[in-house]
Image (cartoon, rainbow, N blue to C red):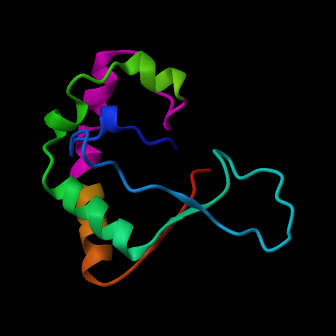
Amino acid sequence: MRASTRWCPAGPTRSWPRWRPVVRLGRRYSDWGYGPPQYLTLDRVRLAAEILHQTAYDQLIQGVDPSELTRAEIYPQIWDSSASLDSARHLFTPLTEFFRGAASTGHAMLIWID
């Protein structure tokens, strides 16, 4: 996953929390899907929860060109039209609630997309 202040609803002075790679402990992994697992520290989870909570979905997608998402290989790779941005709208509230729940209970996150 790639982060960009262009797509960050918090504006150019703040950025999305950065993903950190998970240490592989000397093992070789051949296929993690869309890359190896990443993690967010508790501080980053709290920051993401705050930003998501303060952001309306329309604000999040304002100025986003679906073709840029396709070129950046943003998962899921469904960004063939501006309507595809609207198709993810129903996922925004549960995502926000998930981050807020993790932040309020003191949890970091381990994330990978397969």
Dividing the picture into quarters, in which one does residue 85 lie?
A: top left
Classify 20 as above or below 55: below
| Residue at figure coordinates x 43%, y 16% from the top left | 67
Instruction: Mark yes or no: residue 79 visible.
Output: no
Query: Could you tell me which residue is drawn at 34 percent across and 18 percent down?
Result: 65
Q: Judge whether 84 appears above or below 112 on screen.
A: above
State left or right for residue 74 relative to residue 4: right
Is 92 on the left or on the right of 108, as rendered? Answer: left
Residue 93 x %, y %:
21, 53
Q: Nearer the viewer, residue 23 or 92?
A: 23
**Is 98 rendered above or below residue 15?**
below
Residue that extends furthest to the bottom in the rendered view of this protein: 105
Q: Is residue 50 visible?
A: yes
Q: Is residue 80 left or right of residue 34?
A: left
Task: Tell me the quarter of the picture where residue 52 sits.
Answer: bottom left
The tally of labels here is: 0
Q: Is residue 89 magenta?
A: yes
| 96 sits left or right of 16 in the view | left
Question: What is the x, y in percent for residue 42?
Answer: 38, 75
Magenta-colored span = 73-93
Residue sitting nearer the eye, 29 or 10? 10
Residue at x 25%, y 63% (from the top left corner): 49
- Identify which residue, 58 or 41, lies in the foreground: 41
**Magenta span contains residue 18:** no
Residue 88 placement (x, y as % from top left): 31, 37
Furthest residue toward front:
13
